[in-house]
Image: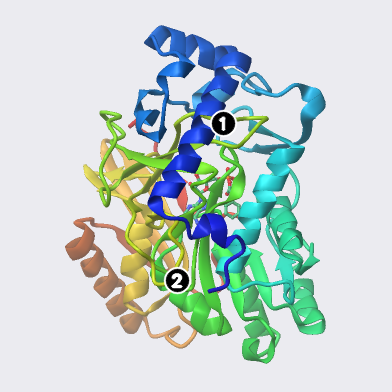
Amino acid sequence: MNCFNPKYECMSREEMRKVQSERLIKTVHRVYENVPFYRKKMDDMGILPGDIKSVDDIAKLPFTTKQDLRDHYPFGLFAAPMEDVVRIHASSGTTGKPTVVGYTKNDIEIWSETMARTFACAGGTNKDIIQIAYGYGLFTGGLGAHYGAEKLGAAVVPISAGNTKKQIMLMQDFGTTLVACTPSYVLFIAETMEEMGIDPKSLKLKAGCFGAEPWTDLMRKEIENKLGILAIDIYGLSEIIGPGVSSECPVQCGLHVNEDHYIPEIIDPNTLEPLGEGQQGELVFTTVTKEALPLLRYRTRDISSLHYGACDCGRTLVRMSRVTGRTDDMLIIRGVNVFPSQIESVLLDMGYTTPHYQIIVDRKGSLDMLEIQVEMTQELFSDQVRKLEDIEKKLRLNLESILGLSAKITLVEPKTIQRSEGKAKRVIALRKERII
Ligand code: DLL
């Protein structure tokens, strides 16, 4: 097993609970003493830091939401003085001001360590050349991956997102062995290689760490087959640290959460009650080592489940199932609840189309209209209208029988749907969204 920090990644459950308990107690004191928002919340609930004696008491603590961060924009929830803050990142929301996060020197250390674990999960060592094609800047993807790769001792190529032909040239010339970017962007890189007549298998690339957006197992297969690499799903969010919260190992059976730093829980998003092992619900994290912005029970809106069983890789860190959607990206089409990733699975499963698609949601009068534009594969692309109609019909019927959803399917020519260098935008909402 290629493990960056076996002491923590392979601890017994008992030892892990001890580590978590000690760190949680410290964090609760820290936020109570330094963040008026948490002091007030805990006072209102009648909880004192001394009431938290172990990780078993975590459910007594208050939740934190994105709205709380917005209400205290930009630095109102920081628990460290600004002179100790060495970095600020932000994630742009759909509306209004971004969500701002801060890091002390020690936070950057932790972040680098957990991202180094992520690269090691993908087989990375100090012998690797790691090309970071996540965007650098306020987004946490670029710099988070950068510091992690350096911590591992690898040679880092900080190219950032975009400039796709140059990405490929450097992969060839530098002998890049590992790449980190969004899954949609790596597909675009693969496609561009094809256009340039470059055989991906002639490269030294052996693995990639892909995340920052939902993607399906079928999309993973597509990436692995096209590039001949191991594609690892990596997960994180700015509020908790950035990338490095959890990562798949080569077993590809759930993402190991770095739970000595970020304690996960699953709750029912409606009742807010904790759910048991294996049950699907909203993922919640409590950071237990962060200094600048420690968060208690942060509601991610991401849907997942937790699994404590042994993993074949030897790591004992709890695994979360891959995030296929968020409680707030669920579409309700004529009363049918559906996530974009479910539509992706149905489309890709039939083999006629590429993973490039767009979901257009509109409303005519009081009726929801759903159109799915999807690119056909180059091989199937044909001018014979009959054949296209046939495929459209098959896709439509499959969607209807699997998801109970009727939709207009529009097959479009290869390479006509806009490619993304960062997070892909799959849904175009033309109707006025309902508040769920
Ligand atoms: O996307 C951090 C990141 C960068 C993760 C690079 C992985 C790689 P935010 O911009 O704050 O941070 O967006 C966080 O993106 O709550 C999820 O909804 C989604 N997300 C992140 N990783 C995955 C993944 C970064 N592997 C939000 N699968 C999260 C599905 C993901 N969704």
Report which residue position mark 1 lands on: 95
Indicate the amino acid at tag 2: Cys
Front one among 177 and 263: 263
Residue 182 appears in the rendering: no
Residue at 55% in and 67% down: 121
Report which residue position mark 2 lands on: 313
Residue at 31% in and 82% down: 386
Count the labels in the image: 2
> Under tag 1, what secondary structure?
loop
Residue 362 appears in the rendering: yes
Mark 1 crowd level (few <14, some 14–19, many ≥20, 10 Å Cα): few
Q: Are marks 2 and 1 in contact (CB under 8 Å)?
A: no
Residue at 73% in and 68% down: 131
Q: Is residue 314 left or right of residue 26?
A: left
Indicate the amino acid at tag 1: Thr
Q: Earlier in the sequence, mark 2 or mark 1?
A: 1
Mark 2 crowd level (few <14, some 14–19, many ≥20, 10 Å Cα): some
Q: Position of residue 135 (x, y in %)?
A: 71, 54
Would you place residue 293 above or below residue 134 in this image? above
Front one among 384 and 98: 98
Which image quarter is the C terminus in? top left
Mark 2 vs ligand 1: CB below 8 Å: no
Q: Position of residue 183 (x, y in %)?
A: 55, 65
> Under tag 2, what secondary structure?
loop
Residue at 23% in and 57% down: 406
